[in-house]
Amino acid sequence: IAPTIPIVLLGDSAGGNLCLALLQKLRAASQPLPQSAVLISPWVDLSVSTASWARFEGLDILPHYTAMRMSIAYLPPRVDSEGWEVSQRGEEVSVHHPLVSPINADLDGFPPLLIIYGDSEAMRDDIERFTKKAKRSVKTAVIVGPGMPHDYPLIGPWLSEEVERAWREITAFICRTSRL
């Protein structure tokens, strides 16, 4: 990343997870970081184990079963010495590894974050825990969409008031943080 070019990361759901993994890798390599990151309903804990998964099952657009399948697919399979897959979830890479589940990452030195999520989404508990952690060491802004599901800024015009508000805030945040 060229320090003279303003760069802002933006990712939703698993893309938010990848933004946080990229920030960790850039920081570890002592590379310049983007000016900021916008995280829309970021998937910060691939263990898929908090209470909000059950609380919002059937209400949110992301079913628990689907999230579990995606979590399993995200990790490499464990393969025996003959090349046969012997488990669905890799044992060499833990679901709790900070690059897999950024809820477990050290966030010191991260650029400003804008975290957006719906208060009726299955990942809510995970995102709230991550937000609390981020606020301890990173300049963090948060938008919570009342009654909104996972990825609500991206799902359509029928949620226009909250969607419009979220995009106004995203635009303002990017303008504020991307000045050199």
Image (spheres, rainbow, N blue to C red):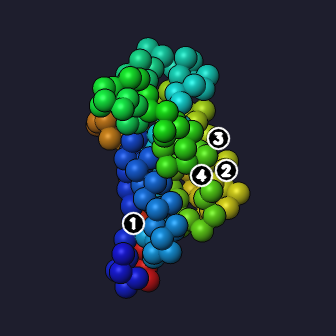
Crowding around mark 4 (Cα neighbors within 10 Å: few <14, some 14 to 19, many 20+) is some
The residue under label 3 is 129
Question: Element at badge 3?
Answer: helix
The residue under label 1 is 8
The residue under label 4 is 105
Identify the disc placed on residue 133.
2
Q: Please, what is the three-letter code of the amino acid marked with disc 1?
A: Val
Quadrant in which residue 59 is drawn: top left
Q: Please, what is the three-letter code of the amino acid marked with disc 2?
A: Lys
Image height check: is 126 above or below 84? below
The residue positioned 67% from the left and 61% from the top of the image is: 137
In the image, taking residue 24 as reference, residue 82 lies left or right, namely: left
In the image, taking residue 109 as reference, residue 69 lies left or right, namely: left
Residue 103 in the image: x percent, y percent? 59, 44
Q: Earlier in the sequence, mark 1 or mark 2?
A: 1
**Label 4, label 1: how far apart the Cα atoms are:** 20 Å
The residue positioned 43% from the left and 79% from the top of the image is: 179
Q: Earlier in the sequence, mark 4 or mark 1?
A: 1
